[in-house]
Amino acid sequence: MDSDTERNIIELCGHAGKILLESGAETARVESTVEYIGRAAGIDISCHAEMTAIFVDSNHNPTTHLVKVRTGDFNLQKVDEINTLSRQFTANQITFEQLKTGIERIDHAVIDFNWPEKILGAGLVSVAPMLLFQATWQDLTLAFFVGIIGYLTAQWAGRVVVTPYFSMGIGGLVIGLLAASLQGIGIATSAQSIIVSALMPLVPGVAITNSLREIIGRHTISGMVRAVDATMTACAIGAGVIIGSLLGHF
């Protein structure tokens, strides 16, 4: 195999790993997927992934390909599509060029739900915990709308302010303020239940789960980075809720 072909394969493997890591895949999945693609293409590849970079090289070539990574929002659909492509390529169901075209398409695709679906999803997620609290129908309805307002506020703040974790704090503040105010004027029965339920759309559940999987899989550095990020997000939300609840009682 000539050096140009080998370099193209290594670069494509790095590209696939970057999409996986930026979309929320755990580092073990990134490394295994990249190595599977390389071996299916005829190169014995080694991959080492961290939260900020991916290192890909051939075991018989001293050159290492470095890909810088900037993690963002989770997009598990992209993770699934890259995994599907890699499996098809490994099983010889698609060619290398088809794999390359597919990875480019996934990278440039904007995979997201529309706003009505996001709003309805935020409301339903906010309602679910109220069923455990055996809340009144009135509080359950209020949690639905408070959760939506908190989610939309966090999304708006994330577009306006680039400071990390600030948007989640603003979302928590609005939820705490609304829940405390509704209880203060006698509309809501339990502000605490509404707050806990309405916070569900903001809770970094996927990040927490992935951090535990990373640590259990002995990818300690990546796991700790994800855990710290999730903890900072939770602290920002908690601080916003406390401030909002205090303001709502005045």
Image (tube, rainbow, N blue to C red):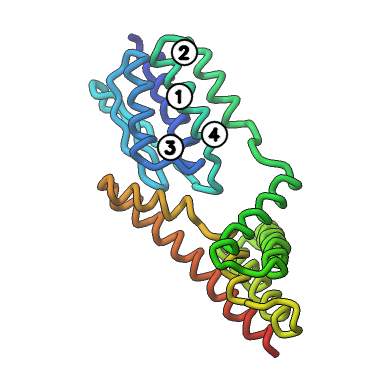
Nearer the N terminus, badge 2 or badge 3?
3
Q: Residues within 10 Å of mark 2 (few under 14, many from 20)?
A: some
| 233 and 190: which is toward the camera | 190
Q: Residue furthest left?
A: 60
Nearer the N terminus, badge 4 or badge 3?
3
**Whole-Å distance between the Cαs marked 3 and 1?**
11 Å
Please identify the quarter of the rendering in which residue 3 is found: top left
- Which of discs 2 and 1 lies nearer the camera? The answer is 2
> Which residue: 48% across, 54% down?
205
Nearer the N terminus, badge 3 or badge 1?
1
Give yes or no for contact between labels 4 and 1 (Cβ–Cβ under 8 Å): no
Q: State the mark number for residue 78.
A: 4
Q: Amino acid at mark 4?
A: Lys
> Which residue: 74% across, 47% down?
115
Nearer the N terminus, badge 2 or badge 1?
1
**Whole-Å distance between the Cαs marked 2 and 3?**
20 Å
**Whole-Å distance between the Cαs marked 4 and 3?**
18 Å
Q: Amino acid at mark 3?
A: Val
- The local secondary structure at tag 1 comes to helix
Q: State the mark number for residue 67.
A: 3
Q: State the mark number for residue 96.
A: 2
Give yes or no for contact between labels 2 and 1 (Cβ–Cβ under 8 Å): yes
Which residue position is annotated with label 1? 12
**Whole-Å distance between the Cαs marked 2 and 1?**
10 Å
**Whole-Å distance between the Cαs marked 4 and 1?**
16 Å
Whether residue 16 can be seen here: yes
Using residue 118 as the reference point, say whether residue 12 is left or right of it: left
Give yes or no for contact between labels 3 and 1 (Cβ–Cβ under 8 Å): no
